[in-house]
Image (spheres, rainbow, N blue to C red):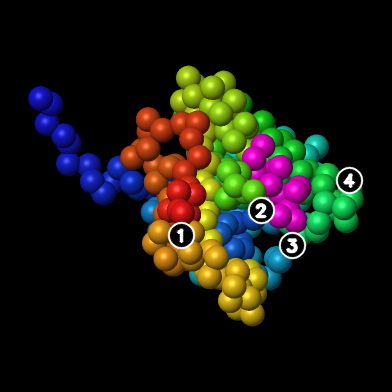
Amino acid sequence: MKKMESSYPHIFSLAGKTAVISGGATGLGLAMTECMVSAGAKVIMLGRSLPETAQAICDQYPGSVFYRQYDVVNTQEAPLLAAELIEAHGQVDILINNAGNHCKKPVEEMTVEDFEGVMKVHVTGAFALSKAFVPHMRQRGSGSILFTASMTSFIGQPYVMGYAAAKSAYLGLVRTLASEVSGDGIRVNAIAPGWIDTPMFRKATDNDPARKAKILGRTPMNKVGEPADIGWAAVYLCSDAAKFITGICLPVDGGALIGF
């Protein structure tokens, strides 16, 4: 039996890797940024606004975190963005499609424009970014593309038709893209966050004890997650520790998908 090399914890390291994270300056995207930097990566955050907030984050991690203003719906700019970032930083090893928006309305009130607006950000925008970086990763013979999926990729939640359709579409994108590019050394995966303790979660549940009780009641661990739980899952899936994992969606949810 071949002796296992003593590579732990280096196999989980992202040292020398460059990651591009859409929506990387806020929420779960920021958690991914911070965890990836802690794992040794250089991170380029993409965002359509919040330059002052983003600059403050860059100042906390000088030389490790950068910001580029970019709106994922401007899909015609994706190839130019990819070329610019590759030229400026030498390589892009990781792409995380995390940017998103939301529309919460009953189906009768949700307009076609509302629905399309959510799909454009999540699905079309993520497709365009992935397409833009694939040739570079193929040329290098390595890369990792990650999508931020959702509980709504798997379960029905009312009033979020567009969001649920978009996050469900991610599963198809992951499986199909993985089948196309994994032979070239590019792994494609997704994370489905459960209920995470963010300002958005607190806003939705602080004055709605019944909703919070329902969430905890279907979560076997009987608690919500922390943003870093998503960040560290992203680090794992983009590290060499996950080098034989592609085409999957990892729920990080305290067991909510299997909860009774």
Which one is earlier in the sequence, the residue at label 3 or at label 4? Answer: 3
Q: Position of residue 184 (x, y in %)?
A: 49, 21
Which one is earlier in the sequence, the residue at label 1 or at label 2? Answer: 2
Task: Kindly report which numbered mark, 1 or 4, lies closer to the viewer in this rendering.
Answer: 1
Which one is earlier in the sequence, the residue at label 2 or at label 3? Answer: 3
Mark 4 — residue?
A: 112
The answer to whether one can see residue 76 in this image is yes
Mark 1 — residue?
A: 219
Disc 2 residue crowd, few under 14, some 14–19, many 20+, Cα 10 Å = few
Mark-to-mark CA distance, 3 and 1: 35 Å
Q: Which residues are magenta?
A: 158-169
The amino acid type of the residue labelled 2 equals Gln
Q: Main secondary structure of the magenta part?
A: helix
Q: Nearer the viewer, residue 15 or 49?
A: 49
Task: Kindly report which numbered mark, 2 or 3, lies closer to the viewer in this rendering.
Answer: 2
The amino acid type of the residue labelled 3 equals Ser
Mark-to-mark CA distance, 1 and 4: 34 Å
Disc 3 residue crowd, few under 14, some 14–19, many 20+, Cα 10 Å = some
Q: Which corner quadrant holds the N terminus?
A: top left
Locate residue 115 relative to residue 36 in the image: left or right.
right
Query: Dividing the picture into quarters, in which one does residue 25 lie?
Result: bottom right
Mark 2 — residue?
A: 157
The amino acid type of the residue labelled 4 equals Val
Mark-to-mark CA distance, 2 and 3: 29 Å
Mark 3 — residue?
A: 49
Task: Kindly report which numbered mark, 4 or 2, lies closer to the viewer in this rendering.
Answer: 2
